[in-house]
Structures are given as structure tokens and as C-alpha cells.
Image: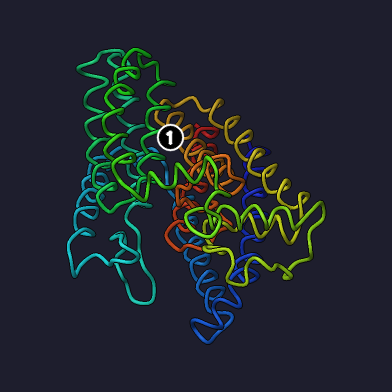
């Protein structure tokens, strides 16, 4: 599987390099006005990138199978962090959400760490319960209860996008492990009241749904972000207006360096540039799935599947949001968007995938 590891690593490095370029391109003017330094976000991004490589190197030096021994402690620590971040004066609040710990010069988002913790726990659970996975009481209920606790704490922040992402990936892992489809049907029915109270009864979330259906109806209000994103893609044409020459990043498109970075790629590099990014993510999903398919160890197999799913699904959702195919979720584009916690964790996940491939091959 050495060729597959080289392929996955090369794809991720290409996306990371593009991310460095686009973080500066999209944030330079914004940083100059708000921070007095056009390199502010770029410098922080590079620091996070260096931290990501350090943590990735540590993970590559370990045997991933040792994670099974600490799957439950990692999960308990994660739940504790998700509780603490909700406590005033401990967790940092911003734009109506309390999702961060302020640690020195950067903010740490425990939800990102929860992705690793939940994947490791679910992989360990499914590999241990291989004979009970079809059992409602012993296989389905325990895993869904743990998932429910984690997602409930994330929703409390509130962060519906991350809760949906983690929940969807764990459900996929459960299905691949041989879980009964009927149980997932029960889960879907139970989710209907939750959808009603979390989306329909929450004005700003319901506005996102209405805006998604017709953003141009209120292009200067609720639909402003989506319409500006579509203008960016339309302005780029086939080959783009040129790197650094975006108009939409000049305070027209909110979150240009985070959630909507692909829109600026489409404007500056055109359809060719945006489609190349999509192809790179498609190649990552394909090659990652090939790695997972060849893993013999059940724990490694489920963990690899979870890693490919969570990175691939996040990319799909982000692309869908930026082109107007999905309602706004607030999920960054992996490896490219600015965001310290997300970048570090995503690099750790890739390193873990490569570790699984290497260790399993040598076993």
C-alpha cells in the first residue's frame, strides 16, 4: 500500500499548499484593515500548519492499535472539554456561539478534537461488538447513546453543522459494520422532532433553509452570503480573473478566508481551479477508500472508513454550500480554509490514516 500512502500524502500536501496561498489571498486586505498587518492570518495559519506537522509526525511514530486502550479515556476527556467550553469565563463566546478555549495566542475548538475521539471510540466499539452489532440493545443503543451525548453538547454551543457531520459519519460506520437498516430507520424517525425544534423553531436556521431555496429573493439580507458566493463563481468564468484579483473578497463575501474560500478560488482561478480542487478531494476519497478496503484489522478498518468519511463528507458539504446546492452549515473546506483547530486535527486524521496503512501492511 506504499503507493496509496504516497498518493494520499501528495494530494493532501497539494491542498495544504493551495490553502496557504488562498489564506493570504483572501485575508490580506481584511487583515490589514482589522489587524493592521496583511500577513496576520497567514502567519497564524503557518504556525498552525507547523503544529499540524508536529502532531502528524507524532501520530506516524506510534502504533495506531494502541489507541484502543485509551479510546474511552479520550472520549471522557472530550466530553469534559465540551462541558467546560459552555461554562462562562472558561469557554470563549463569539458571534453568539461558545465554542472555543482561548490558549495564549490561539483559540482551541474542542469540537474538532471530538471528531478524533468519536471516531476512535466508534471504531473500537464496532470492532469489539462485531457479534452484537445487529443487536438493538447491545449494539445499537450503547453507541447511539454516546453519540447523542457528544452531539447534544456540540448542539448546545450551538454548532449544528459539526454535530450533523459527526453523527452522519458514526451512522455510516455502524451501517458498514453490519448494523440493521431498520435501526437507522428508527433513528431517522426519532430525529424528526429534533429537526423541528433545532431548525424549524430556530429563526436563523429556518431562514437559512428559506434562503437556500431562493437566495436572490433577499439578496441584500439573509441571502447575501449565498448570492455573493454565486457572483464570485460567475465572475471567475473558465480561467478566473487572476490570483489575487478577486473583487468579492473586498468585504463583499463574508467568511471569504474560512467557509467560502472555494468561492474565491472559483473567482480567481475560474472553473478550472475550482474543479481541480474538487477533483483532488475526489481523488483523496477514492485513494483513502482503497486503503480502508485493504486493511485487515477490524479496528483499523473502521477507523480508516471513519477518517475518509469525515474528511470527504466535510468537503462535499462545503462545496455544496458554496455553490448553493446545500443550506449554509458553517463547515470549513479541509486543508484550505483558515482555522487552526480544524487544520491541525485534519492533518492528524490523515497521519492516522497513513499510520493504519503502514502498520497493517507490516503486520
State left or right for residue 171 relative to residue 296: left
User: Where residue 289 sits: x, y (%)?
Assistant: 57, 31
Mark 1, Cα crowd under 10 Å, few <14 / some 14-19 / many 20+, is: many
State left or right for residue 18 relative to residue 30: right
Q: Nearer the viewer, residue 185 or 128?
A: 185
Q: Nearer the viewer, residue 323 or 338?
A: 323
User: Where residue 195 sits: x, y (%)?
Assistant: 32, 34
State left or right for residue 10 relative to residue 37: right
Q: Which residue is mark 1?
A: 303
Q: Residue at x 35, y 45 (%)?
A: 160
Q: Quadrant of residue 278?
A: top right
Q: Quadrant of residue 263?
A: bottom right
User: Where residue 361 sits: x, y (%)?
Assistant: 55, 33
The N terminus is located in which quarter? top right
Q: Residue furthest right?
A: 239
State left or right for residue 270 relative to residue 45: right
Q: Is residue 69 above or below residue 260?
A: above
Way the structure is coloured? rainbow
Q: Residue at x 38, y 14 (%)?
A: 181
User: Where residue 202 sits: x, y (%)?
Assistant: 30, 46
Q: Is residue 335 above or below residue 251?
A: above
Q: Is residue 112 above or below residue 42?
A: above
Q: Secondary structure at mark 1?
A: helix
Across the whole image, how many numbered discs are drawn on residues?
A: 1
Q: Residue furthest bottom?
A: 36
Amino acid at each position: 500500500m506504499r503507493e496509496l500512502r504516497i498518493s494520499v500524502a501528495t494530494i493532501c500536501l497539494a491542498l495544504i499548499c493551495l490553502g496557504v496561498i488562498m489564506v493570504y489571498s483572501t485575508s490580506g486586505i481584511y487583515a490589514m484593515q482589522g489587524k493592521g498587518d496583511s500577513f496576520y492570518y497567514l502567519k497564524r495559519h503557518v504556525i498552525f500548519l507547523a503544529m499540524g506537522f508536529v502532531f502528524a509526525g507524532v501520530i506516524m511514530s506510534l502504533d495506531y492499535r494502541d489507541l484502543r486502550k485509551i479510546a474511552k479515556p479520550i472520549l471522557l476527556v472530550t466530553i469534559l472539554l465540551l462541558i467546560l467550553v459552555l461554562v462562562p469565563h472558561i469557554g470563549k463566546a463569539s458571534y453568539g456561539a461558545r465554542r472555543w478555549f482561548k490558549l495564549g495566542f490561539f483559540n482551541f475548538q474542542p469540537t474538532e478534537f471530538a471528531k478524533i475521539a468519536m471516531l476512535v471510540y466508534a471504531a473500537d466499539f464496532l470492532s469489539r461488538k462485531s457479534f452484537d452489532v445487529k443487536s438493538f440493545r447491545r449494539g445499537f443503543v450503547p453507541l447511539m447513546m454516546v453519540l447523542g451525548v457528544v452531539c447534544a453538547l456540540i448542539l448546545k454551543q450551538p454548532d449544528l453543522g459539526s454535530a450533523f457531520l459527526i453523527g452522519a459519519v458514526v451512522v455510516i460506520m455502524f451501517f458498514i459494520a453490519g448494523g440493521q437498516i431498520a435501526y437507522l430507520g428508527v433513528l431517522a424517525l426519532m430525529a424528526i422532532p429534533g429537526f423541528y425544534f433545532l431548525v424549524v423553531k430556530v429563526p436563523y436556521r429556518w431562514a437559512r433553509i428559506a434562503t437556500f431555496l431562493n437566495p436572490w429573493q433577499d439578496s441584500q439580507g439573509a441571502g447575501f452570503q449565498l448570492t455573493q458566493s454565486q457572483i464570485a463563481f460567475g465572475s471567475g468564468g473558465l480561467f478566473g480573473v487572476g490570483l489575487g484579483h478577486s473583487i468579492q473578497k473586498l468585504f463583499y463575501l463574508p467568511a471569504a478566508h474560512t467557509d467560502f474560500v472555494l468561492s474565491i478560488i472559483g473567482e480567481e482561478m475560474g472553473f478550472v481551479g475550482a474543479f481541480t480542487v474538487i477533483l483532488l478531494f475526489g481523488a483523496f476519497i477514492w485513494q483513502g477508500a482503497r486503503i480502508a478496503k485493504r486493511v485487515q484489522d477490524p479496528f483499523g478498518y473502521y477507523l480508516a472508513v471513519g477518517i475518509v468519511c469525515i474528511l470527504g463528507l466535510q468537503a462535499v458539504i462545503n462545496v455544496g454550500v458554496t455553490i448553493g446546492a446545500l443550506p449554509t452549515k458553517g463547515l470549513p473546506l479541509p486543508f484550505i480554509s483558515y482555522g487552526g483547530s480544524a487544520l491541525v486535527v485534519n492533518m492528524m486524521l490523515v497521519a492516522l490514516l497513513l499510520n493504519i496503512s503502514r502498520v497493517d501492511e507490516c503486520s
